[in-house]
Amino acid sequence: WLPIEDAPKDGTTVWLYVWHEIGHQYGYGRYEKHGSIEGWISYGLHFGGGYETGIGLAHPSHFMNITPPMNIRTADKEK
């Protein structure tokens, strides 16, 4: 996990980590800007035993890049 200050703000979707006094959340989202309004938008956060889907504002402290899935055929050719 990397500090949120280092996260891309170009609309790239990343993993987000949100710390709360009562626990923590993680999920995915991206930084969006619409006119004079901008900030982190989450598209699903896991909290405790459940998973919240839907769009919401997030105040993450850390992020992690989402790596694309490995293409097995490409990996086999590289061997």
Image (spheres, rainbow, N blue to C red):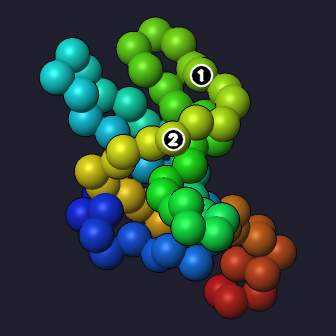
Task: Please state which of residues 50 and 37 is positioned toward the viewer in this rendering.
Answer: 37
First in sequence: mark 2 vs mark 1: 1
> Which circle, 2 or 1, is nearer the viewer?
2
- Residue linked to disc 2: 57
- Residue at 35 percent of width and 48 percent of height: 60
Q: Is residue 31 above or below residue 8?
A: above
Q: Residue furthest front?
A: 36
Judge whether residue 14 can be spotted in this image: no
Q: From this viewpoint, which residue is outermost toward the left?
A: 21
Q: Is residue 68 left or right of residue 77?
A: left
Q: Is residue 56 above or below residue 15?
A: above
Does residue 54 appear in this view? yes
Screen quadrant of the C terminus: bottom right
Gap between marks 2 and 1, in whole Å? Answer: 13 Å
Give the structural element (helix, strand or loop) at label 1: strand
Disc 2, SS = strand
Q: Position of residue 77 (x, y in %)?
A: 77, 87
Residue at the outermost right position: 73
Q: Residue at x 50, y 74 (%)?
A: 9
How many residues crowd mark 1 within 10 Å: few (<14), some (14–19), many (20+)?
Answer: some
Q: Residue at x 16, y 23 (%)?
A: 21
Q: Which mark is residue 52?
A: 1
Is 53 left, or right, of 8 in this rendering? right
| 10 Å crowding of disc 2: few (<14), some (14-19), many (20+) | few
In the image, taking residue 19 as reference, residue 65 lies left or right, namely right
